[in-house]
């Protein structure tokens, strides 16, 4: 037992992540038992908790021949679900399909399957198999390498399978078949991977090809008819030229839409965003085009800086005022860019002269922004850059040899600069007096270094040996943080407050250290990060951590929220050599060996913070203030700037519901509670951020709905284990009435709550009716003048988690938990007038726009739908990577905010505004004539951003 506890290493790795590894280690120990006794030697033979899975997997791999090993690779990769901005996970393995595709020689697949099953690395299921422990994806280096090598192909294969499945589940709708470039890309990929396709995917591709042929035939036939009619005088042409052109543009838009995702997946976010604008411009009323355009807000992409010099870019940095970006390339060029317009300002030429290489591996601004340094052969070159158009050369810091200086960094106060030569010698200069402050000393080839914010310590990471701390004042090493023997990349980053150090971990991932205490905090793992990390950076506020990878990915973690992966950005096609946040933290610049710098919007479409999962959200009706739960507190944001303006502390329980009074002066926060405890409501004065009173509601269990009456004089509350609705006077916290629509006010058991508990509340605009939706599928309507239950009630098949009155009070919209329909009840007749169908899972929330023209719906199907209530049609669909529990709408800024398991998501749902923003920020936002001809040959060339905001 002591040995197991020692191997678990509490505090270093999450205990939950260790449990599957522990299970496997004990299983293999049992298989190596002596009689009925588990022995320490048997346990050690497994490699211990952290190596047991790796040991078993390597043994299986080594036991097979070349074909068997290749079969293992195919089987395991078939069981990996590539994360779209999240970590990779397990998926079901189609073993019958793999065997069928093996043809007449299934032997290697069978042998590999049997060996994996015997080693308990995969488990056989009814439909196939699955990887037994998700930990295998991260614990076995060989599998991590396979995933990294095949990631892009696996993602394309995965998306093709998803598209085929969607097509099949939607009745093989021909509109869902692949078209245009998306079909060509799928065909090109399938040429070398046809054996990996199942019958459904093969049929999907086959039908897509047939559909393309039919389209060509229809086009040719129509053209023939038009020619004949034209020859006869054209009198039979029944439709106008404008209508025909409109249909053609809509059809072309439909072909462009799939290309948007393909371009993004292929590492071309710039092209993806251009195509999204073009699809919308061609068909501004198309649901598909609008949804695609709005979904670009999920992608973080801002713009691409392309020097067009064909050279890898090793470093991109922001000036301290955030107005300038400097880049250094392998061809010896240093370029300055305007960080606002993204235009190139000037090029500092290759100082080595024509035909000679002067590799620029690092560029750095001095803290006051007046000087720029660049590392090159035998020196660190300095320029004065107060005039960005005309940088002035300053005396260089010479090393005294001809070795390439591979790294350079300023201290925070700008007085010191550290440089490391290619041979591994570290030098520290006094920049003011242009002199070395200490004799060069060896730290190891390929090392990196960074000053702590107080400039007292230099942290030095080398590929082998220790991460060492060098005391700048006393010119000596003080201690080492960690030792390792495996070769690692030496990227490192120190948070601006100097408290946290990030560096690659020996066994994969990113290691985080408490720098003042010299204590390791935790390790971020996943996606073969130990091998992938090439560059690291903290955001200025320390909340975000960015890692650039050798695998071309840029990963962003929310360090403030427990190092949760926020985004996996795929805009590069080669190694990411540097990552750097702008001074305000709003932009991340990533430089790559693919010769470009990608700029990423770090606001993205989410709010940063330690948010409570699955809670409600609300906008103030009076102004653009957003209230959202952050653990036990409620935070107020000014939107759309996303600026925190207030924090309302809670009693330690997660807020389950929030509601503003109509005039925006009051905020009610309902807390959760255990079934045997009473829930509470806290009333806040929004303007003065003052707690007015706490109401003990006497509801049993977690409160799940609250609503202010339109005049603000009554607050209605309900709870999940309570069949009553209680009405309160917000002025003094007194109870006005208790509405007993379900036969009493006794506390419900968990079983009876499923049939009698109240799920949702909503007041009519005139305040005369209060609607309460219950788990039993009944919406009870209360006359608030008499606090009496109306004779009529509205019934549906399942629970009613969502209610919303139209602003004119004539319609009540309800969301179902079972049949996925939105029902629109005509309150004059108490009958369903219309049903809206698009969601595929429970509907959790509904909200009308103030003018009643728009309805927003949120669902467990991970989507938010935007509905046109004038003609009861779908306007757009917004997709998240988690279930959406609640939604709020700010009509003034046309902003939707949705909450669920992840951070709150923010979308602007004005497609023209989104298109204008894209056109306004991209350098060269229009498709080129050549690009247009390749992608849209059916129409003459047009500038994509004509009529939209553009910098020219």
Image (spheres, grey):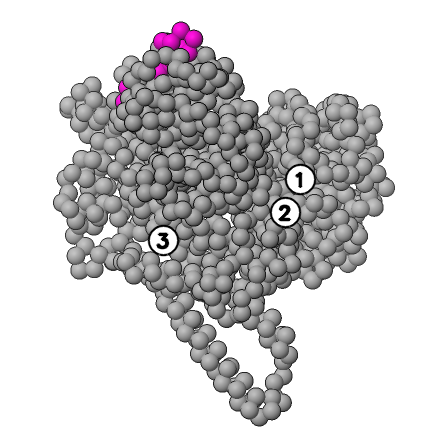
**Residue beneath label 3, please?**
157
Name the element at disc 3: helix
User: Spatial distance from mark 1 to mark 3, Cα to Cα?
Assistant: 38 Å
Which callout, 2 or 3, points at the residue further toward the start of the chain?
3
Which callout, 1 or 3, points at the residue further toward the start of the chain?
3
- The furthest residue to the right: 785
State the image coordinates of residue 265 (x, y, percent, origin top left).
43, 50
User: Spatial distance from mark 2 to mark 3, Cα to Cα?
Assistant: 31 Å
Determine whether, in the image, residue 211 is placed left or right of residue 29. Answer: right
Tag shown at residue 242:
none
For label 1, count other residues whose C-alpha is less than 10 Å away and answer few (under 14), some (14-19) or many (20+): some
Q: Are marks 1 and 2 in contact (CB under 8 Å)?
A: yes
Viewer-proximal residue among 308 and 810: 308
Residue at coordinates 34% horizontally, 19% vertically from top-left?
A: 426
**Residue beneath label 1, please?**
640
For label 2, count other residues whose C-alpha is less than 10 Å away and answer few (under 14), some (14-19) or many (20+): some
**Is 686 covered by the magenta stretch?**
no
Name the element at disc 2: strand
Q: Which residues are magenta?
A: 462-476
Q: Are marks 2 and 3 in contact (CB under 8 Å)?
A: no
């Amino acid at each position: 037992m002591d040995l197991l506890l020692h191997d678990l290493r509490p505090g270093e790795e999450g205990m939950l992540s260790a449990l599957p590894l522990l299970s496997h280690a004990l299983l293999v120990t049992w298989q190596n038992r002596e009689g009925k006794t588990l022995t320490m030697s048997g346990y050690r033979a497994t490699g211990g908790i952290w190596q047991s899975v790796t040991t078993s997997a390597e043994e299986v791999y080594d036991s097979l021949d070349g074909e068997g090993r290749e079969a293992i690779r195919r089987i395991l990769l078939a069981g990996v679900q590539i994360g779209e901005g999240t970590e990779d996970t397990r998926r079901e393995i189609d073993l019958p399909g793999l065997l069928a595709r093996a043809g007449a020689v299934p032997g290697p697949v069978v042998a590999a399957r049997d060996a994996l099953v015997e080693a308990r690395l995969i488990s056989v299921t009814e439909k196939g198999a699955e990887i037994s422990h998700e930990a295998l994806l991260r614990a076995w280096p060989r599998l991590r390498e396979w995933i990294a090598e095949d990631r892009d192909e696996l993602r394309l294969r995965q998306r093709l399978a998803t598209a085929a499945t969607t097509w099949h589940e939607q009745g093989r709708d021909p509109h869902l078949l692949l078209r245009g470039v998306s079909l060509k890309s799928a065909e090109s990929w399938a040429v070398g991977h046809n054996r990996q396709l199942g019958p459904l995917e093969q049929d999907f591709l086959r039908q897509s090809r047939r559909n393309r042929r039919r389209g060509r035939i229809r086009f040719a036939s129509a053209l023939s008819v038009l020619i004949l009619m034209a020859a006869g005088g054209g009198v039979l042409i029944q439709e106008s030229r404008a209508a025909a052109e409109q249909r053609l543009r809509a059809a072309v838009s439909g072909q462009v839409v799939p290309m948007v995702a393909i371009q993004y997946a292929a590492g071309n976010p710039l092209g993806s965003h251009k195509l999204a604008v073009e699809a919308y411009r061609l068909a501004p009323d198309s649901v598909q085009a609008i949804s695609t355009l709005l979904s670009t807000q999920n992608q973080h992409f801002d713009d691409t800086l392309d020097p067009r010099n064909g050279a890898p870019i090793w470093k991109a940095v922001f000036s301290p005022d955030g107005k300038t970006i400097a880049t250094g390339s392998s061809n010896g060029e240093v370029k300055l860019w305007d960080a606002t317009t993204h235009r190139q300002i000037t090029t500092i030429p290759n100082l080595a002269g024509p035909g000679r290489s002067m590799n620029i591996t690092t560029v750095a601004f001095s803290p006051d922004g007046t000087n720029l340094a660049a590392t090159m052969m035998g020196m660190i070159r300095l320029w004065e850059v107060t005039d960005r158009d005309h940088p002035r050369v300053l005396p260089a810091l010479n090393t005294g040899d001809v070795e390439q200086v591979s790294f350079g960094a300023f201290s925070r106060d700008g007085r010191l600069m550290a440089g490391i030569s290619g041979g591994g010698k570290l030098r520290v200069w006094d920049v003011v007096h242009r002199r070395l402050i200490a004799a060069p000393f060896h730290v190891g080839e390929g090392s990196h270094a960074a000053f702590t914010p107080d400039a007292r310590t230099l942290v030095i990471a080398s590929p082998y040996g220790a991460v060492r701390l060098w005391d700048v004042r006393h010119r000596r090493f003080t201690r080492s943080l960690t030792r390792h023997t495996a070769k690692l990349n030496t990227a490192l980053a120190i948070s601006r407050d100097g408290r946290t150090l990030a560096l690659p971990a020996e066994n994969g991932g990113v290691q985080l250290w408490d720098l003042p205490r010299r204590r390791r905090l935790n390790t971020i793992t996943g996606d073969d990060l130990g091998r992938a990390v090439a560059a690291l950076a903290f955001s200025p506020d320390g909340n975000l951590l960015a890692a650039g990878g050798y695998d071309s990915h840029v990963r962003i973690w929310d360090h403030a929220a427990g190092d949760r992966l926020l985004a996996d950005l795929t805009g590069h096609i080669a190694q990411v050599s540097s990552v750097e946040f702008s001074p305000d933290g709003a932009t991340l610049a990533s430089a790559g060996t693919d010769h470009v710098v990608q700029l990423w919007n770090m606001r993205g479409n989410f709010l940063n913070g330690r948010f409570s999962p699955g809670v409600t959200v609300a906008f103030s009706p009076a102004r653009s203030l957003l209230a959202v739960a952050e653990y036990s507190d409620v935070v107020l944001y000014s939107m759309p700037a996303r600026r925190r303006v207030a924090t309302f502390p809670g009693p330690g329980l997660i807020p389950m519901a929030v509601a503003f009074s109509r005039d925006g002066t009051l905020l009610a926060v309902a807390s959760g509670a255990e079934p045997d405890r009473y829930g509470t409501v806290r009333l806040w004065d929004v303007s003065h951020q003052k707690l007015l009173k706490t109401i003990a509601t006497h509801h049993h269990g977690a409160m799940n709905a609250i609503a202010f009456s339109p005049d603000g004089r009554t607050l209605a509350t309900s709870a999940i284990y309570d069949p009553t609705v209680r009405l309160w006077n917000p002025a003094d916290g007194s109870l006005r009435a208790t509405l007993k629509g379900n036969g009493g006010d006794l506390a419900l058991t968990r079983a009876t709550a499923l049939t009698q508990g109240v799920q949702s509340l909503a007041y009519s605009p005139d305040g005369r009716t209060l609607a309460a939706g219950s788990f039993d599928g009944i919406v009870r309507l209360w006359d608030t003048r008499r606090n009496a239950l109306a004779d009529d009630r509205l019934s549906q098949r399942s629970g009613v988690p969502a209610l919303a009155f139209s602003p004119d009070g004539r319609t009540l919209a309800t969301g179902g938990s079972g049949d996925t329909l939105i029902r629109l009840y005509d309150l004059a007749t108490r009958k369903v007038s219309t049903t809206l169908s698009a969601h595929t899972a429970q509907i959790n929330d509904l909200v009308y726009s103030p003018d009643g023209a728009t309805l927003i719906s949120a669902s467990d199907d991970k989507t938010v739908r935007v509905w046109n209530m004038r003609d009861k049609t779908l306007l757009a669909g917004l997709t998240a990577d988690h279930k959406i529990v609640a939604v709020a709408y700010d009509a003034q800024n046309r902003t939707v905010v949705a909450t669920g398991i992840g951070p709150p998501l923010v979308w602007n749902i004005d497609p023209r505004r989104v298109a204008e923003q894209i056109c306004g920020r991209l350098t060269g936002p229009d498709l080129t004539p050549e690009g247009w001809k390749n992608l849209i040959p059916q129409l003459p060339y047009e500038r994509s951003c004509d009529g939209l905001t553009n910098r020219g």
